[in-house]
Image (cartoon, grey):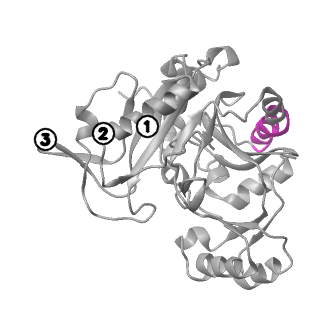
Amino acid sequence: KIDYTVVGPEADLMEGIVDLFQDSGLKIIGPHKDAALLEGSKSFAKDFMKKYGIRTAEYEVFTDSDAAKEYIVSCRYPIVIKADGLASGKGVEILYTLEDAVRTIEDYMENGKFHEASRKIVIEEFLDGKEASIITLFDGERIIPLNSTMDHKKIGEGETGLNTGGMGSLTPNPYYTREIEEDFRNSIMNRTLEGLIAEDLRFKGVIFFGLMLTDRGSYLLEYNLRFGDPETQSLLETLTSDLNSIFLKTLEGCLHEEHVTCSEESALCVVLSSKCYPSSSNEDIDITDFFRSSHDKIRIYSYASRLEGKDILSHSGRILSVVSRGNKEDVHKNVYDYLLEVRNENLYYRRDIGRI
């Protein structure tokens, strides 16, 4: 007997796994197929934000590459180009010149860089500021925030290079002040709730708000309708409420603010990837040593790995997350001291997570 299911992969949500489970009488945390478009289609999400007065970057949507190229001639640079569909967190480009923007449009729309996901694109104004991730739970009536997190998307230190699924996170986000939280609740979260109810998009699951904190206020960049990775690893370290109880109250439609409590401590998560990431490789990497060494201030999360004899092997992409909880300075030292102790020349990680 399945008590309930929590969905991780966004593709499964878009394909209707929640509808399938509910039709079978099974409890499941996640949006039904119609609501999943808030994550699965950037244009759908942006139109939803615009309709309900949710502060977001100015944008235009294109299905014709020639029209997109004509539009960007008069844009103020930098601009942001996004694949409309799911692209594993990699379908976003910041372009600083017209030439680069034209090349990106061709890659996305004409060459199908992300297949059907990039045949339609969203072109947005560039917003300058600090990013914040707010993970919340929606019980069909209320949206309840868990905690704030700072994600590090770029592969290179100093937030440089290619986009990734995320190279590390810090919880809580040091830039997410009480004033910003109030602005987020009033201008973004409450209006999202209003829109979900008005559009009959109620569900029981996660709403992840990707924010840009600017001098003009908080802007909503995107919705995800699942727990973020690596944000969840650091967030769960700070959660002092029982997660199972929170999920059950979400499913019952009776989750309230008092059911969610978090520690005053910080938690840092650093992601270790293959050296070729975000490109892929089939080369095996031995990660056994990370599970042989014990450290009472460190928690290890493994991505796709397998046991071969007595060895634990993985390959390609993001491979491990290393997490510590404590005060902000201690967690940084704990994680990076551990990584110096358990060296692996086949793995890459950023050394500035939580310092940006």
**290 and 262: which is toward the camera:** 290
Residue 89 location, quadrant: bottom right
Q: Outermost residue, bottom direction?
A: 66
Q: Position of residue 315 (x, y in %)?
A: 30, 56
Residue picked out by circle 3: 310
Q: Label 2 crowding class (10 Å Cα cut-off): few <14, some 14-19, many 20+?
A: some
* Residue found 38% across the figure and 59% down from its top: 275
User: Circle 1 sits in a helix, a strand or a loop, which is it?
Assistant: helix
Residue numbers of the magenta segment: 185-199
Q: Position of residue 354 (x, y in %)?
A: 58, 39
Camera-near label (3 vs 1) is: 1
Return the mark for residue 342. 2
Q: Label 1 crowding class (10 Å Cα cut-off): few <14, some 14-19, many 20+?
A: some
User: Circle 2 sits in a helix, a strand or a loop, which is it?
Assistant: loop
Tell me if residue 286 comes above or below residue 101 in the rendering: above
Q: Label 3 crowding class (10 Å Cα cut-off): few <14, some 14-19, many 20+?
A: few
Q: Position of residue 337 (x, y in %)?
A: 40, 34
Distance CA(mark 2)–CA(mark 3): 18 Å
Q: Which of disc 1 and disc 3 is earlier in sequence?
A: 3
